[in-house]
């Protein structure tokens, strides 16, 4: 029988492809939609024109439901002293590679959802909009709801799930500690509060009345079935899609995912200033995964941009964020459409 999530979103399969900023565009989302699941477009690192182009591509390729995802962080005030200290910390690496430290404003930006982004979406009326790090202001949410958009957001604790329910979200993504990429935590900064998916999921299911989506460590049909058996109305899967032909995963990231190094991941703030799970590499090992000198999210990124670019041009992932969850066993170099159908084998 279809789950509550499938009924709500009009899906054939109870699967959401996790939005992965920097590792995908519309092509991956379209392929997942083609299998009857919910493809997602990450918009946090896209400018307004790029969002328009990607949405045009999705709507030209499919009439099935899709999701657009945004961050909801508060931009930190300028902190020149912290930035200078961070560049000083990274100076030996710049010297080693023979490059100059970049300007503080260099590097990819991550913008929170705002009125300009909402205006772009109004022209396309995406059926699902999801958020990370909480929710935007009530007025912005109301703009989405005017065209009937379903709103999803991530919770990493029971308290966050209850907070989201109180503000009217349509479904909650229970993000376990195993999940790759940025932790969606927003009511706490205490990493000790974070728990694994199969501990977190049943607690959130019990605490809220809206559908709950399990995320983290889900990589095959068996783990999909396990999540559904614990009360999930659907699952969100990211890492397993990183090797798919439609993904934009970089060459060094793909190589890392297929190496023994992929078995060891950790939460780190050295790449963005906020805890995110990735494969342990040189920078994480030498600076420590969680470094107190990293400027607040997303300001840590700028000083690393030139290091990453130079190292990747030499085939090295020493300074690249290799986002991945703890379970990389589901990664396949196949079409995302086929992978989605394999993941849903126990659901059909």
Image (cartoon, grey):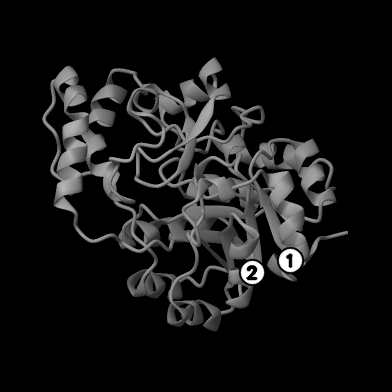
Secondary structure type for disc 2: helix
Give yes or no for contact between labels 2 and 1 (Cβ–Cβ under 8 Å).
Answer: yes
Judged from the image, the secondary structure of the residue bearing numbered disc 1 is: helix
Q: What residue is pinned by disc 2?
A: 162
Disc 1 packing (10 Å; few <14; some 14–19; many ≥20):
some
| Residue toward you, 328 or 37 | 328
Instruction: Give residue 202's position: percent from left, percent from top.
Output: 77, 54
Q: On the image, which quarter does residue 232 sit in? A: bottom right
Which residue is depicted at the point 15% across and 38% down?
A: 102
Lateral position of residue 21 relative to residue 82, left or right:
right
The structure residue drawn at horizontal position 34% and vertical position 18%, both measured from the top left corner, is 315
Residue 24 or residue 108, whichever sits in front: 108
Q: Nearer the viewer, residue 106 or 246?
A: 106
Left or right: residue 174 versus residue 256 is right
| Image position of 186 with respect to 293: above or below | below
**Above/below status of 325 relative to 227:** above
**Position of residue 322 in the picture relative to residue 343 (left or right):** left
Q: Position of residue 45 (x, y in %)?
A: 36, 52
Q: Position of residue 215 (x, y in %)?
A: 64, 48
Query: What residue is shown at x 83% (from left), y 60% (from top)?
Result: 2
Looking at this view, name the residue that lies furthest to the right.
Answer: 1
Residue 323 visible in the picture: yes
Judge the density around disc 2: few (<14), some (14-19), many (≥20) Cα neighbours within 10 Å.
some
Q: Is residue 202 above or below residue 181?
A: below
Residue sitting nearer the eye, 207 or 310: 207
Would residue 6 be visible to someone looking at this image? no
Q: Report the label total.
A: 2
Q: Which mark is residue 207?
A: 1
**Earlier residue among tags 2 and 1:** 2
């Amino acid at each position: 029988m279809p789950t509550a999530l499938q009924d709500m979103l009009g899906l054939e399969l109870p699967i959401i492809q996790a939005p992965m900023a920097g590792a995908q565009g519309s092509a991956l989302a379209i392929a997942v939609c083609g299998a009857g699941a919910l493809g997602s477009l990450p918009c946090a690192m896209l400018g307004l024109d790029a969002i328009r182009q990607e949405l045009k591509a999705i709507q030209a390729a499919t009439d099935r439901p899709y999701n657009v995802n945004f961050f909801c962080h508060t931009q930190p005030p300028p902190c020149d002293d912290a930035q200078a200290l961070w560049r000083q910390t990274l100076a030996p690496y710049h010297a080693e590679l023979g490059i100059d430290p970049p300007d503080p404003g260099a590097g990819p930006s991550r913008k929170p959802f705002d009125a300009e982004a909402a205006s772009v979406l109004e022209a396309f009326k995406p059926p699902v909009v999801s958020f990370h790090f909480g929710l935007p202001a009530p007025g912005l949410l109301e703009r989405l709801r005017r065209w009937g958009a379903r709103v999803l957001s991530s919770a990493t604790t029971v308290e966050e799930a209850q907070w989201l329910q109180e503000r009217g979200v349509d479904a909650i993504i229970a993000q376990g500690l195993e999940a790759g990429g940025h932790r969606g935590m927003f009511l706490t900064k205490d990493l000790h509060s974070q728990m694994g998916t199969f501990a977190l999921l049943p607690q959130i299911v019990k605490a809220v009345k809206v559908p709950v989506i399990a995320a983290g460590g889900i990589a095959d049909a068996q783990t999909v079935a396990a999540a559904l058996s614990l009360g999930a109305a659907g699952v969100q899967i990211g890492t397993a899609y990183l090797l798919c032909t439609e993904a934009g995963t970089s060459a060094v990231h793909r190589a890392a995912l297929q190496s023994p190094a992929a078995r060891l991941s950790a939460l780190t703030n050295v790449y963005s200033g906020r805890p995110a799970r990735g494969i342990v590499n040189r920078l994480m090992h030498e600076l420590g995964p969680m470094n107190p000198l990293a400027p607040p999210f997303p300001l840590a990124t700028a000083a690393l941009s030139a290091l990453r670019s130079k190292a990747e041009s030499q085939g090295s992932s020493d300074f690249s964020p290799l986002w991945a969850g703890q379970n990389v066993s589901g990664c396949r170099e196949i079409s995302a459409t086929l992978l989605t159908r394999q993941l849903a084998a126990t659901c059909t």
